[in-house]
Image: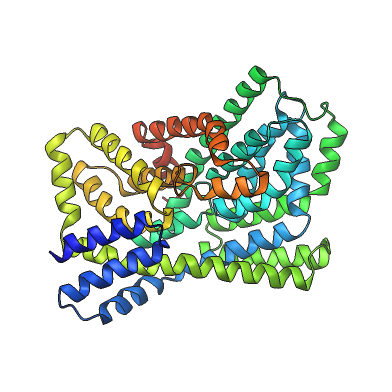
């Protein structure tokens, strides 16, 4: 009875648009009270979940992105990417995807990517004659590579939740992230040719060289962070901390484009976002414990296996469910709640946990583009001023291209497992 009440309350609060941490926390509290379990369990589960050293990486990567966004780093990187692909029809749209791939190497989150780059790219695309809704759509869609290409906050949370190596998960995200970016670039080019979008500039080697020199420190910072974490020089948390230190040197000493006021604002934004993330993770840990104690993962696994014992068909069925979950629940909360259950199913089907985790992360990340939650949709529409319906229509081709990449990841496990096996022997 307590479980039924918890699920009903969860769905009711979710439908009433309560903040997700209240939805999870209150429904968990009601279950605990009805089951005569000491309420101190909530504090114990939150403490246990949040004592992971790896979670310290979250504020570091958020602060790193915020510092760079407050200076001229973003504009310098945009200029460099546009100088390379701007001569192609629809080049600024393609550059939009390219800069998101580049920026994902320091931000780790789609929200930071969308908010930071959108304020520059959306007005620039509108000025060149792109439809406003299309500019918003491609900016939002391209941001989905941020949580896949390392470093990634979603992958850090998934690794902590699943007890897996975050270093291996980072490596596992590289190829899928690059494929997502490539697929969206191809989609952007096809749309540009069909709709006769403009070119941004002529191909000019001198401009490429000039813009490269203009952002060489920013590119060096990205390489420093990526090599530090992927090359084993730092842990993910240490790489984030060193990245912040390097960004401060870049902003205050080398570029001198970041002020004390900018740093204060960046710290406040980071603290607010980090607090939101950690509250969700903490309460979701309690909810996950309840689900595990009720043996729901085993029940779900057995139910799916009654439908099919073919691994591919079972995973495709799971992904259909995940699309629904991702559209109605916040990504981080979804990860903490559903991942342990799906790892049990994956173990039963003989699916590698790294592979299974990346499937879940990619799928739930695409929920950022689907209403009614669709966080990045609301961010880009607030910047562009468009109605969300028109942006959803424009984002659909990019969503489909990412779904095709997800299918490739499902069908070919080596896309996620090859690099971790190659570089961690």
Q: How is the image coloured?
A: rainbow
Q: Residue sitting at 24 percent across and 71 percent down?
A: 30
Q: Residue sitting at 57 percent across and 37 percent down?
A: 391
**Residue 177: where, in percent of width, then height?**
51, 41
The front one of 166 and 160 is 160
The reply, left or right, for residue 306 in relation to residue 120 is left
Q: Is residue 96 above or below residue 73?
A: above
**Residue 312: where, in percent of width, then height?**
26, 33
**Residue 46: where, in percent of width, then height?**
35, 74
The front one of 220 and 67 is 67
Q: Is residue 246 above or below residue 309?
A: below
The front one of 59 and 127 is 127
Quadrant in which residue 92 is drawn: top right
The residue positioned farthest toward the top in the image shown: 194
**Residue 53: where, in percent of width, then height?**
45, 71
Q: Quadrant of the N terminus?
A: bottom left
Q: Is residue 99 above or below residue 5?
A: above
Q: How many marks?
A: 0
The answer to whether residue 164 of the structure is visible from this angle is no
The answer to whether residue 141 of the structure is visible from this angle is yes
The reply, left or right, for residue 384 in relation to residue 34 is right
Quadrant in which residue 384 is drawn: top right
């Amino acid at each position: 009875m307590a479980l039924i009440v918890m699920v009903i309350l969860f769905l009711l609060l979710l439908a009433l648009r309560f903040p997700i941490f209240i939805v999870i926390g209150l429904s968990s509290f009601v279950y605990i009270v009805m089951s005569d379990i000491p309420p101190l369990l909530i504090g114990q589960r939150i403490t246990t979940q949040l004592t992971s050293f790896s979670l310290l990486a979250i504020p570091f990567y958020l602060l790193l992105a915020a510092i760079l966004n407050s200076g001229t780093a973003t504009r310098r990187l945009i200029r460099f990417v546009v100088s390379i692909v701007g001569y192609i029809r629809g080049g600024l749209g393609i550059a939009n995807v390219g800069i998101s791939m580049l920026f994902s190497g320091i931000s780790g989150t789609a929200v930071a990517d969308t908010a930071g780059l959108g304020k520059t790219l959306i007005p620039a695309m509108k000025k060149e004659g792109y439809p406003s809704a299309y500019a918003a759509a491609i900016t939002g869609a391209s941001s989905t590579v941020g949580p896949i290409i390392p470093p990634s906050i979603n992958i850090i949370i998934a690794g902590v939740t699943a007890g897996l190596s975050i270093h291996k998960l980072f490596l596992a995200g590289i190829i899928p992230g690059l494929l997502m970016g490539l697929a969206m670039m191809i989609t952007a080019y096809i749309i540009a040719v069909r709709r006769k979008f403009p070119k941004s500039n002529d191909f000019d080697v001198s401009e490429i060289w000039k813009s490269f020199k203009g952002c060489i420190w920013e590119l060096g910072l990205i390489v420093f962070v990526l090599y530090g974490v992927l090359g084993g020089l730092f842990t993910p948390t240490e790489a984030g901390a060193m990245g912040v230190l390097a960004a401060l040197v870049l902003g205050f000493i080398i570029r001198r484009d970041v002020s004390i006021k900018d740093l204060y604002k960046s710290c406040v934004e980071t603290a607010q976002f980090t607090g939101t993330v950690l509250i969700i993770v903490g309460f979701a840990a309690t909810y996950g414990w309840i689900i595990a104690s009720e043996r729901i993962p085993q029940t779900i696994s057995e139910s799916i296996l009654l439908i099919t014992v073919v691994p591919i068909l079972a995973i495709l069925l799971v992904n259909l469910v995940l699309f629904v979950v991702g559209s109605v629940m916040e990504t981080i909360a979804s990860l903490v709640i559903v991942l342990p259950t799906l790892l049990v199913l994956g173990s039963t089907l003989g699916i590698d946990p790294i592979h299974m985790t990346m499937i879940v992360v990619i799928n739930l990340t695409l929920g950022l583009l689907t209403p009614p939650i669709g966080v990045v949709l609301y961010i880009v529409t607030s910047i562009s001023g468009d109605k969300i319906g028109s942006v959803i229509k424009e984002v659909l081709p990019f969503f489909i291209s990412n779904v095709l990449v997800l299918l490739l990841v499902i069908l070919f496990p080596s896309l996620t497992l090859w690099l971790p096996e190659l570089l961690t022997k």
